[in-house]
Amino acid sequence: MSRQLSGARLTRWRDAPAWWRRTASAVLALVVIGVGWGPLAAQQLLDRVVARVNGQFLTLTDLRAAMALGVVDVSEEIDDRDAIGELVDRHLILAEVERYAPPEPAAAAIAQEAGKLIAHVGSRLAAVMASTGIDESGIRGLARDNLRIQAYLDQRFGTAEQLTEEDVARYYQIHPDEFTRDGALMPFTQAEPLSRQRAGSERRVSIVAQWTGDLRARGDVTVMLPTPLPAAPPQR
């Protein structure tokens, strides 16, 4: 009898509208997260779902840890939706990384990258670990993902963009502040290597952003922005 009931429930679930299944899944995720991660009210508050990416739930805890460790930009120009968007894009890119599997980063490289993340947090490390539940293993995991993402992007898009002399000169003309030293504009002949490097970086950022937008368009992404979003830990 119990098997018959389970089969009937499964049939009703499959026959339900897609929007209903998505809502029910989000609610279930909130319940599981709240029950599984402890009874503290502050912890439950942090563990709200902020996005769903191809069936995977991203929580406010994920976001806060990423922001604190510098994995997600927290500059004044970035609002809450942009920060969540960066975390969503990271998960979409990691899914591509898993598909094509670039070489595994060396242990020493992972340790070095983890050190950079820890240095970014500084004296707030203990507080961040306590409030988000991330530990040293989790930080190493983020560091490993950073290196795998970088290796994949380098492999797919190259480490340097092919630019014309006109491209390099145009960047120099549009961004004079970047080539001003002690109040004087550097001659183009002196600034050309730096202008080429930065123009190439700008081009690559634009190409990667377009590619990431295509990943979003093809994926199943829902952003569930809490209102208001609790404040991030202060920067020091």
Image (cartoon, rainbow, N blue to C red):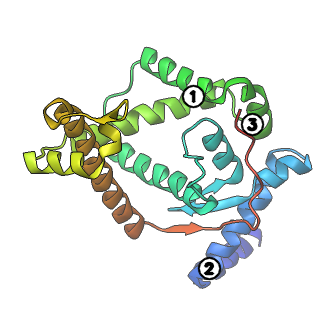
Label 1: which residue? Answer: 117
Mark 1 vs mark 3: give the one in front. Answer: 1
Relative to 37, 29 lies left or right: left
Q: Residues within 10 Å of mark 1 (few under 14, many from 20)?
A: many
Disc 1 residue type (three-letter): Leu
Q: Mark 1 touching mark 3, by CB under 8 A?
A: no
Q: CA distance from mark 1 to mark 3?
A: 16 Å
* Residue occupying the far front of the picture: 183
Amino acid identity at mark 3? Gly
At a point 24% along the width and 34% down the height, the residue shown is 186
Q: Secondary structure at mark 1?
A: helix
Check disc 3 and report the residue beneath it.
133
Q: Tag 3: Cα neighbours inside 10 Å, few (<14), some, or many (≥20)?
A: some
The N terminus - image quarter: bottom right
Residue type for callout 2: Thr
Quarter of the picture containing the C terminus is top right
Q: Secondary structure at mark 2?
A: helix
**Spot occupied by residue 65 in the image (x, y as percentages of width and height):** 66, 41
User: Dots 2 and 3: beta carbons under 8 Å?
Assistant: no
Residue 112, visible in the rendered structure: yes
Name the residue that disc number 2 marks.
11
User: Closer to the camera, 176 or 199?
Assistant: 176
Q: Nearer the viewer, residue 76 or 87?
A: 76
Label 1 or label 2, whichever comes before in sequence order: 2
Residue 185 versus residue 93 in the image, above or below = above
